[in-house]
Amino acid sequence: MTILAVMGIAFVTGVLSWAGTAAVRRGLLARQILDQPNARSSHHTPVPRGGGVAIVLTVTIMMVLLAISDGTMTKEFAVILGATLVVAGISFWDDLRGLPAWVRFLSHIGAVAAGIFILPDSGIFQGWLPGYLDRMVAAVLWVWFVNLYNFMDGIDGLAALETIAIGLGLAVVSGLAHTGIDGGPIIIASAAFGFLIWNFPPAKIFLGDVGSVALGYMLGYLLLLLASHGGWAAAIILPMYYLVDATITLLQRLFRGEKIWQAHREHAYQKAVIQGSSHGAVIGQITLCNIFLVVLAGLTMVMSSRVDIVLVGFAFGLSAILWRHLSRQRR
């Protein structure tokens, strides 16, 4: 794909997502579908919830058009796109009316089960695990990634900026590795950018589960696909801050005997806001971290594979330092 084609796809996708978000926002306001502030909220006024519908529809339209033009309308493509739409639909119903946690979780498991067996036969862990165990571990990680993406959508602009960083990082790494999966990440990142215009602090609309769950599912698939092509280190590095914050927070809550499926405000980025930092300041620090993570992920493609574990260690250390900093940050 030429640079001009990439720029054209990115521009059209961004504009479509921006316009779609504006339309969805008007509809949500008209129907009074609002996220009301409560003790666990990081906002103080009602904000429309469910703007991720615009991202899902934009990505669907652009991915189908790209697949038709490239002749890549495959069974695998149909399965992932179909599963994305199903899980997004269930999540949107949850945004509108509310659903039990077990129903939402089962939908995540079902979507992952539909997609896990269409990944390349080479496996995700490059022969380190036997075939059946390779798929099982990959499925568990995928389900966790879907949920952590939802957990981490707690302040203005964070999920959109994370999606842009991972999407662009995937495009760069995939281009360097010649995996041929750069079109999808560009579309996802551009759709997130169009949404970000409305979601940047102070947010005029929230992503909702329909957006965070669908994005987690799609990006999780692309990261596993990258790992199956040998880019396991880059696949770990790109979402490293999300992985660190969400996993440490989950373990802390488990050790305290808390119900991990219930909403809370204990992530490091949420603590920073509670302690007085602005949403913009917090997402700025995480975005800076993500820039370094994209660079480290890119280095895994141009340096010897013997240093992959070192680069993963750097990425973990950087993310852990930021997690610690945000957890203790003061105004």
Image (cartoon, rainbow, N blue to C red):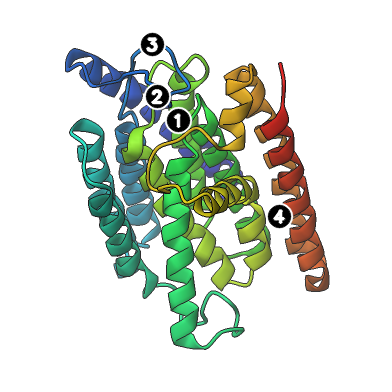
Residue 192: image location, x then y, percent? 47, 34
| Residue at the (34%, 24%) spot, across then down | 21
Residue assigned mark 1 = 14
The earlier-in-sequence mark between 1 and 3 is: 1
Closer-to-camera residue (66/281)? 281
Question: Do labels 2 and 3 touch, CB within 8 Å?
Answer: no
Q: CA distance from mark 4 to mark 2?
A: 29 Å
- Amino acid residing under circle 3: Thr
Determine whether the residue tagged by mark 3 lies in a helix, strand or loop: loop
Question: Which residue is tagged 2?
Answer: 18
Q: Foreground residue, 251 or 236?
A: 251
Locate residue 99: give its quadrant.
top left
Q: Is residue 117 left or right of residue 157?
A: left
> On the image, numbered disc 4 is attached to which residue?
297
The residues bearing labels 1 and 2 have C-alpha atoms spaced at a distance of 6 Å
Vertical order, 263 against 140 (above or below): above
Q: Residue furthest top?
A: 45
Judge whether 81 appears above or below 307 on screen: above
Camera-side mark, 1 or 3: 3
Is residue 120 among what the camera can see?
no
Q: Quadrant of the C terminus?
A: top right
State the image coordinates of residue 233 (x, y, percent, origin top left).
68, 64
| Mark 4 vs 2, N-terminal side | 2
Q: Which residue is mark 3?
A: 45
Task: Please tell me which residue is depicted at 50% across the width and 24% down the height of the picture.
Answer: 156
**Counting other residues with Cα less than 10 Å from the Cα at mark 4, is it few (<14), some (14-19), or many (20 or more)?**
many
Provide the secondary structure element on which disc 2 rests.
helix
Badge 1 marks a residue whose secondary structure is: helix
